[in-house]
Image (tube, rainbow, N blue to C red):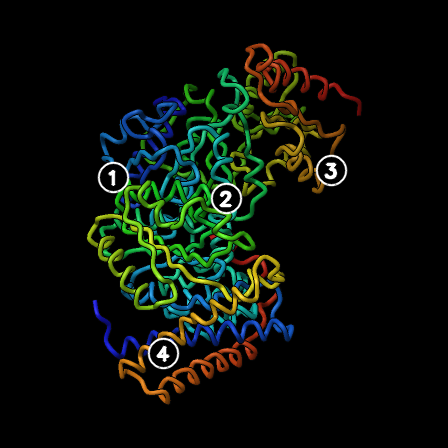
Amino acid sequence: MRELSYAEAIREALQQEMQRDERVFIIGEDVGVYGGAFGVTLGLVEEFGEERVIDTPISELGIAGAITGAALMGMRPVGEIMFMDFTTLAMEQLVNQAAKIRFMFGGKAKVPFVLRTPAGSGTGAAAQHSQSLENWFVHVPGLKVVMPSTPYDAKGLLIASIRDDNPVIFIEHKLLYKVKGPVPEEPYTIPLGTTEVKREGRDLTIIATSIMVQRSLEAAQQLAEEGIEVEVIDPRTLKPLDKEPLIRSVMKTGRVLIVHEACKTGGYGGELAAVIAESEAFDYLDVPIIRLAGRDMPIPYNRTLEYHTVPQVENIVQAARDLARGRM
Amino acid sequence: MSLSETKKRELLRQMYTIRAFEEKAEQLYAMGKVHGTMHLSIGMEASAVGSIAALRPDDLILSTHRGHGHCIAKGADLRLMMAEFMGKEAGYCRGRGGSMHIADVKGGNLGANGVVGGGIPIAVGVGLSLKMQKRDQIILCFFGDGAANLGPFHEALNMAAIWKLPVVFVCENNQYAMSLSVKKAFPIERISDRAAAYGMPGVTVDGNDVMAVYEAVSQAVKRARAGEGPTLIENVTYRWRGHSKSDANRYRTREEIEAWKQKCPIKRFRARLIEEGILTEEEADRIAQEAYAAVDAAVAFAEASPEPALETIEEGVYA
């Protein structure tokens, strides 16, 4: 199959949905001729014009309000917030308005938008351009939260998100933009709320999100050489969460390592651990559930310090090895 | 843009209906028949009625936490409003929203809002869609003086102006953001002066004169519909009641409130219509009585309506 980068896969999803449905439009800062801060929307303004690829002033809350109002009016807007850190500027509209309008109005309105935003560290962008704030949104009923880890998932999940009737926070990872993988040319959807087993294994389950899926797969490769067979699972959408594959996997392996980039305290790993602990998989656990996550600190600028702030492949290998060899 | 006599009588009826609805709301609260809080616009009826009179029926509005008047002027069914107010399944929002979130999307009321300034950025999205969909409707967005000091006001007015969106921004300056006087919150005399910074017309109107409000908003609507962009209107008015039910009125004097009551927008418009020979005293009384009777009927409807069923509790969170 043809290979695309993660950024190209997202761009193709946007392009195909805009060709299919004239209600779909893009709005954000520098999304036009500039192509977005990471080049994701490059070329789209040439194809669809300034009416459907709309450059905004630096007004993140304005963007969130614009997509909320447009969605209420039957459009299918795709907003872009240049860095996930800046979603904090848009929180009022996202949390108090978009997420709640349908419920507050007794189910008599809907707000079908997608808000795309790049998260994550590793680019030397320091503390205000590197955060992973997904759990802020997971905690808000009414929002859906999507975090693709591969080009294939990025395209299928984005198309599904655009066609979804709810506000969807679509979280991309900056370091994944250049990662390549097989992507079908035709449009396809991956239903929101479908966990995928990315690699099968019998000894240990790793549940990872976003870039940590890629790092976990790399770790699993190394561990296989040591004779440790790791199963790597990607929820792909944090909300809604498809729990069953996680539970089944843990019942098979009895050992689970949860890996994400966001700060450990209050992170999504706590939710995943609780889902397992509350399920029938609890009785199958041979060792405690372990979380490997970002340190509880801002992302530092210095390259070495930044590297050691969030889980890397070697940290995952070490943690998985310890867990696999842990006491019964 | 002169209004027909029928339309003028209709505006008076709407103003009485708003007054009747809110007086009743207050009574029901005092009787313990509704819980939560409410924000009454008694004394501000001309702002709601005059503004919405300038719209076509298919135009849209975004309202505020003090939105009963907007909702009624937009043509809401009083029974469904009152049912919502009392938390009943038959209410506009199936009892999930209450006073602060009444919306009648089909009727063009895209919702009251519990957050000060919360509707202003949404108006940009609505206006943008109307433009993209090549529809000739407009969106009128109400907010208060307090909202004009929020960041969203700045972002939204700028965006609406640069894209020449069909939006009319109506600031209901009722003199207080909860307890903070506009005199302490603004270094300028007129909130509408801020329009100049966004390259749009700004107009300050006597918000207790329903016809003056109607005239000013009509100009703005005309401009918006012609594709010339938004206008900022400031309706100068006064809320007679406290901010909400917890307000002890410590920040203003009885004399001030009494002075504004002398400028009652309903009495004033009624007197004008009688003076113009459009109404007799008796006809005016009858309009008032009918308004109060309609509200009583709405209460009877709401009281007889069932509570939402507990098994439906999570409905509407997701589509």
The chain letter for the residue carrying disc 1 is: A
* Nearest the eye: B130 or A211: B130
At label 4, the amino acid type is Arg
In the figure, is residue A12 to the left or right of A257?
left
Same chain, labels 3 and 2: yes
At label 2, the amino acid type is Glu
Of badges 1 and 2, nearer the viewer stands: 2
The chain letter for the residue carrying disc 3 is: A
Which residue in the structure is indicated by mark 4? B270
- Secondary structure under tag 2 reads helix
* Nearest the eye: B68 or B79: B68
- Secondary structure under tag 4 reads helix
Of badges 3 and 4, nearer the viewer stands: 4
Q: Position of residue B65 (x, y in %)?
A: 49, 58
Label drawn at residue A51: 1
At label 1, the amino acid type is Glu
Identify the image quadrant of residue B8.
bottom left
Please name the residue shown 57% across and 30% down the image: A233
Looking at the rendering, in which quadrant would you find the N terminus of chain A? top left
Which residue in the structure is indicated by mark 3? A282
